[in-house]
Image (spheres, rainbow, N blue to C red):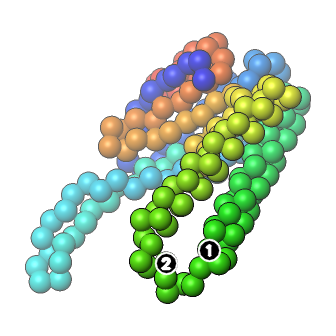
Amino acid sequence: MDARIRLPIYPGRNVFRFPDRCVYCGGPHEATLLLGPLVRLHLAAVSPAGASGMNRTYVRYLIEGLEVPYCRQHAREAGRNRIILTALYLVGAAAAVLLLFTAFAGHDPHDLAGESWNLALLLAAVGAGLLGWMYVAWRGLGLIWPSLRHMPMLPTEQGGLGFEYSVSPEQGMAEFRFASTEMARAFLRINATR
């Protein structure tokens, strides 16, 4: 993503708004995709609680559901890209299960405890292979559908076509990354004074 913006977040509810145009191309706002709310808990303090243990105080940070504006074409592409990425994850998970099953098919389960080093290497190899395959498939499909390269690849990443975001309660910041520098500037103008 080309442009990064960091905005403060506060304990409780945080609302961010987008400009009234397509977040990916800047065209007219014709469709809205809703991204669910994001909640992060941050351990604020730990204090003794007597004989029962420790009291932990958490602060809740909530980013309200984001209403992301798109033109019709990019709303369709965002939906298609989510389906493609979901299919990649499902195929990758099925491949990992199949690899692990074939690796352990000829072993007695009681013998595996003695082979923990081999097991760790096997699991690491399967995980690295799976991530490598998914990355190559994602990049290859990005040649067919270029907008796929502007989507978050990992399921742990938040965002949609043309932007990503993450929250860091420890720093009290939310970071937004945009494919379009102009859209990032417009987003900053709207949300800088919230």
**Above or below, comparing residue 170 to residue 144 in the picture:** below
Q: What amino acid is found at the position of numbered circle 2 in the picture?
A: Leu
Q: Residue at x 42, y 65 (%)?
A: 117
User: Left or right: 114 with respect to 128?
Assistant: left
Q: Residue at x 65, y 78 (%)?
A: 106
Decide which of 171, 67 is in the foreground and name it. 171
Assess disc 2: are there few (<14), some (14-19) or many (≥20) residues with their C-alpha within 10 Å of its C-alpha. few
Residue 66, picture quadrant: top right
Assess disc 1: are there few (<14), some (14-19) or many (≥20) residues with their C-alpha within 10 Å of its C-alpha. few
User: Left or right: 25 with respect to 44?
Assistant: right
* Marks 1/2: CA–CA distance: 9 Å
Residue 15, picture quadrant: top right
Mark 2 lies on a secondary structure that is helix
Identify the mark nearer the N-term, 1 or 2: 1
Q: Residue at x 12, y 83 (%)?
A: 51
Instruction: In the displayed orientation, state which residue is furthest to the top.
Output: 182
Q: Report whether residue 29 is seen.
A: no
| Quadrant location, the N terminus | top right
Residue tagged by mark 1? 104
Mark 1 lies on a secondary structure that is helix
**Above or below, comparing residue 192 to residue 114 in the picture:** above
Q: What amino acid is found at the position of numbered circle 1 in the picture?
A: Phe
**Above or below, comparing residue 24 to residue 108 in the picture:** above
- Position of residue 104 measured from the top left corner of the image (x, y, whole percent): 62, 74
- Position of residue 74 measured from the top left corner of the image (x, y, whole percent): 83, 30
Residue 169, picture quadrant: top left
Q: Label for residue 112?
A: 2
- Position of residue 44 measured from the top left corner of the image (x, y, whole percent): 26, 54
Q: Report whether residue 129 is seen.
A: yes
The reply to whether dot 1 and dot 2 touch (C-beta < 8 Å) is yes
Q: Residue at x 46, y 41 (%)?
A: 167
Q: Label for residue 32?
A: none
